[in-house]
Image: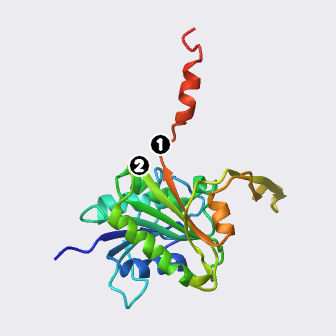
Amino acid sequence: MSRKPLILVTNDDGITAPGIRHLIQIMNTIGDVVVVAPDRPQSGMGHAITLSENLYCDPVVIDQYSDIEEYSCSGTPVDCVKIGTQQILVRQPDLLVSGINHGSNASINVIYSGTMSAAVEAGIEGIPAIGFSLLDYSMEADFKPSTKYVKRIAMEVLEKGLPPRTVLNVNIPIAKKSSDIKGIKICRQAQAKWQEQFDKRSNPQGRDYYWLSGEFVNQDDGENTDVEALENNYVSVVPIQFDLTAHTALEELKKWDLDA
């Protein structure tokens, strides 16, 4: 009898966040699940790792009626993947899933995302990986309409694998029911940025401090982007590569007279 796939689950909103709890339930219908996730919110940590502090990873019981193996980690999402694959799992997982994130990781958000960095870290190690995000920042977000899409994508990756050095960035529109979502689109990442500003204030001791705020600005008028798909109630799936070489610029740079 063939063994069930081993699935490592993590996130950046913390191990008790509703999004990861829902993702665990979905993955538990597919394979054997092990959870290694941050002990507190780690949003916006990108690919940060813990170097100057002790790293703790303790077994926990979140759901007393579940027999799923779970660990709460003091580090970042990338730390969770590293310690999960190198210290906790007895073999390499067949799949890493990260999320479900509370909020969008479409377009440029992928750069800052701890959710997606966890997936990228798994991809670096040759593990098929997916980051899932729902476009609802609320801790009361309803993840049920996303269930069949999350499961379908995960099953496809387990069956077919992914191209080398590639992971998937999956974003899901807000929906009241599953049928409100029109389907799944394979997309490219929209060209966009955050137009940021800092709110400068002073504490009671007179020392200045800053709150970062900003507005998401989509600069892409083209078609087949993740932002366009989401605006039209489709799940967006963007293949992400972690080779950051700008291959289109190589020939141009070779024309430079750098040996002069």
Residue farthest along the left direction in this orientation = 1
Q: Quadrant of residue 113?
A: bottom right
The amino acid marked with disc number 1 is Asp
Q: Are marks 2 and 1 in contact (CB under 8 Å)?
A: yes
Establish if 108 lies above or below 98: above
- Compare residues 117 and 221 and report the one nearer the observer: 221
Seen at 43% across and 76% down, the residue is: 151
Instruction: Please tell me the numbered disc located at residue 102.
Output: none
Q: Residue at x 60, y 75 (%)?
A: 182
The residue that mark 2 highlights is: 165
| Residue that sits furthest to the top in the current view | 260
Residue 169 % position (x, y): 52, 60
Secondary structure state at the residue bearing disc 1: loop
Q: Residue at x 60, y 77 (%)?
A: 181
Question: Which residue position holds label 1?
Answer: 243
Q: Mark 2 or mark 1: name the one nearer the start of the chain.
A: 2
- List the single residue furthest toward the bottom: 65
Seen at 69% across and 68% down, the residue is: 231
Report helix, strand or loop for mark 2. loop
Neighbours of disc 2 within 10 Å: few (<14), some (14-19), many (20+): some
- Which of 43/201 is in front? 43
Find the distance from the CA under tag 2 to the CA under tag 1: 7 Å
**Kind of residue at badge 2:** Arg
Spot occupied by residue 129 in the image (x, y as percentages of width and height): 42, 61
- The answer to which quarter of the image holds residue 153 is bottom left
Query: Is residue 58 visible to the viewer in this orientation of the structure?
Result: yes
- Left or right: 253 in relation to 200: left
Within 10 angstroms of label 1, few (less than 14), some, or many (20 or more) residues? few
Q: Position of residue 172 (x, y in %)?
A: 58, 71
